[in-house]
Amino acid sequence: MTRFLLASSICIAMAACGPSRNSEKACVGTDCASGSCTSGDVRDCYTGDSSTDNVGLCHGGMQTCNSAGQWDTCEGEVTPTGEVCGDNMDNDCDGQVDEDTDNDGDGYTTCQGDCCDNPTECSNPGLVNPGAFDVAGNGVDDDCDGVVDNPPVNCDSGLSSNSSNAMDYAKAIDLCQQVDAMGNVAGKMYGPRWGVVSATLTKADGTALNSAQSVQHSIRPHYGTGTMPQAGASLIELSTGNAAATSDTNPGPDVEEDGAFGQSSPFPSDWYTANGSKLPNAPGCPAPSGDTANDPVMLTLSIRVPTNASSFSLGLNFFSSEFPEWTCSPYNDFFVVLLDSMWSGMPANPTDKNLALYTQTSTMKKYPVGVNLAFGNTGLFTQCINGNIGCDGTAGTISTCMSTAELAGTGMDQPDLGGGCSGGDTELGGGTGWLTTSGNVKAGEIMKLRIAIWDTSDDALDSLAVIDNFLWSVQSSDPGTVIQARPPSAPVTVEPVSRLEQ
């Protein structure tokens, strides 16, 4: 067995050999050898930044040439880690012992748990600290908890379906970490960390729900038999009627899909004012009437944003028994996802804060998420039966329905023997299928997210939203709501009619 004795100082100076002794071209004396080798050979190696070799605790190791003629991993080396305060050692190999610094300017010092404060320790030190979220699959301990690429945390099992604890609803959409107003987590050192600061269930204006409205929200393992969680074990349902499918209990279903609780509130005032004190409307459809949210329910979450996050997304699925008859009518039940954030970059969040808005790219027309997504073949209403729509609203047709699988077992899959829009045998409702809603946020801020649904213009016929799978991203997003949709079809003929008595 032959050992290569490498002249480290000469090798480091030779650019062709790369910055470390573990580059693809190894240094042998003053020459650069190829990455191939003779089986059984060994050589010195070091994979850390060359400036940290033999500084502090850091030192090189040895590599062995395997039977395939390639160098194996560098065994026995020690590379820079986060500084451990009080151990009287130079862990990050920068020539200083137990220094308490914030060299990367991320607001966390080495003694406050920042495991990467210098570029010798990781490639993006400003994004790595105890306040970050762990980015899946990037091979970095982003949140400095000692684990690289933490497995997903399951916090949504065993939650009561009829829970009145709003923090349970945060858990059900996979927001597992809870912090106090200062960002502290019980039982964990070093803050502030990201997490849910507070959660409430209220009417659309933030006032308290009536006791009868406890059936308007629920936590479920699925909605019906065809709509499953996108992550974890649970999803949440918010409804203008009973938040339940046909076979559910606690709460149980309203088989008529026509629950009315006699409750109302003003609309969210900032959103309403930003829209000129008018409800925004789908292009080509008659304006909603009234200034009252009927049978409203809203989940509000205050969340400290991770220090490495630029955006978030969540999955939503909107169902309505207003479809197909009342499509493109004044009775488009409203669903909003309102984001309060200090984000000032581009792309900008919507000026009225509502992320539950679809922009049709071919026309740049904007559609609030609701049953009117079925009008004009936007492609975002896919869980339904193609045919006539709007027979009690604005008459037209839809051809973008793909399936009724996600209606199965919800109650909206029952035949509408009262006539529907085709003379009979249409289903009682329809849905969008899973959509993705995203918005941009400022790292480290406390953002507010309000998710609300209510009946518009009256309290007849119900709509229900399923929400799940909250995710952070280090990249900014294009704020709004999207789905992989088919191209829009031809325009629909507009023929307004009045609403029938229910």
Image (tube, helix red, strand yellow):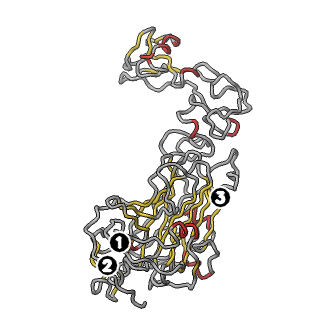
Q: Residue at x 50, y 39 (%)?
A: 139
42 or 407: which is nearer to us? 407
Dot 3: element: strand
User: Is any atom of residue 236 visible in this view?
Assistant: yes
Label 3 vs label 2: CA separation? 44 Å
367 or 450: which is nearer to us? 367
User: Image height check: is 381 above or below 190?
Assistant: below
Verify CB contact (< 8 Å) between mark 2 and mark 1.
yes
Mark 1, Cα crowd under 10 Å, few <14 / some 14-19 / many 20+, is many
Question: Identity of the amino acid at label 3?
Answer: Val
Question: Identity of the amino acid at label 2?
Answer: Ile
Image quadrant holding the C terminus, namely: bottom left
23 or 497: which is nearer to us? 497
Q: Which residue is mark 2?
A: 389
Dot 1: element: helix
Q: Position of residue 131 (x, y in %)?
A: 62, 46
Q: Position of residue 147 (x, y in %)?
A: 57, 42
In front: label 3 or label 1:
1
Q: Is residue 174 left or right of residue 56?
A: left
Q: Which residue is mark 3?
A: 197
User: Image height check: is 246 above or below 366?
Assistant: below
Q: Which residue is mark 1?
A: 374
Of the image marks 3 and 2, the number of the one nearer the N terminus = 3
